[in-house]
Amino acid sequence: MAASSSALMTSSSTSTSAVKKASKEEIAKNIAESKLMVSVSRDKHTEVVSVSSLIEAAKKANRAIIFFITPGPFKKDLPPHWGDDPRRLGCTLNVNKCEADLLELDADIFAINHHSAEYQAGTANEEGLVKRKGLTNVRMISGNNGELQEKWKLRTLPIENDNEKYLDRLTVVIMPNGAIHAFDDLVGPLNDAKMNLHIAAIKSIIAPVQNNTPSANTPAAPAKK
């Protein structure tokens, strides 16, 4: 089954419903237009920058930017009852496949999860999530204690007797020309076949940028008014 993708025009309307879950298109638009300050982590290093500056830097370098939103992964033990819902499973596979298989693309890659920046980057005495998962190409963005979930209307996966906001999977790709693509095809439990389809769909969008050849699937950004 082909990956579920949606190409957006940045002028698309935003839902005002407070009850209905936001669509992948609405979430992607919220991210693309965001000016929130976020914590971006590598191993033993965190910097606080605006999302808009990350997007603008990628555009100036003629690179796409990819945001992978995942429920986890975790450094050590999983929360109780984590495996009760198969949608929560496969976070490590998710980030590791993105690290390995998207390295050659003209793209800046970020993994977003609910964890704190300290948990992601680690401390002087303890390895963080970035190190434990062997990430050098993928940087992590903290959920900022639920702020991203609230401002971007991110979907969450509830877990019994746990007040944490574990984020549902979504991948957002923003092209150098401003076109936006959203994928929500990674329904867990993940496996190599699903991830390979996901990676292939992303490569079909971004790879032509390497040759400065616009993809037929990538609409031009709307003109500014």
Image: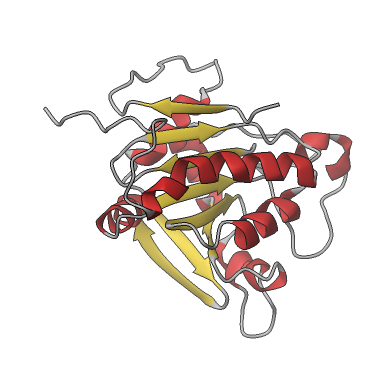
Furthest-left residue in this view: 225
Give the percent coordinates (x, y) of residue 138.
Answer: 55, 62
State the colouring used for the structure image.
Answer: secondary structure
At 48% across and 26% down in the image, what residue appears? 6
Image check: 214 left or right of 103? Answer: left
Residue 214 sits above or below residue 132 on the image? above
Q: Quadrant of the N terminus?
A: top right
Give the percent coordinates (x, y) of residue 111.
Answer: 56, 54
For this rendering, which residue is in front, 146 or 95? 95
Give the percent coordinates (x, y) of residue 58.
Answer: 33, 56
At 61% across and 65% down in the image, what residue appears? 120
Note whether residue 104 is visible. Answer: yes
Q: Which quadrant of the structure image shows residue 89?
A: top right
Note whether residue 146 is visible. Answer: no
Residue 132 sits above or below residue 58 on the image? below
Image check: 1 left or right of 80? Answer: left
Give the percent coordinates (x, y) of residue 187.
Answer: 72, 33
Q: Quadrant of the C terminus?
A: top left
At 27% across and 32% down in the image, what residue appears? 220
What is the count of numbered marks? 0
Residue 212 sits above or below residue 49 on the image? above
Residue 127 sits above or below residue 140 on the image? below
Image check: 193 left or right of 134? Answer: right
Q: Which quadrant of the structure image shows residue 197?
A: top right
At 46% across and 14% down in the image, what residue appears? 17
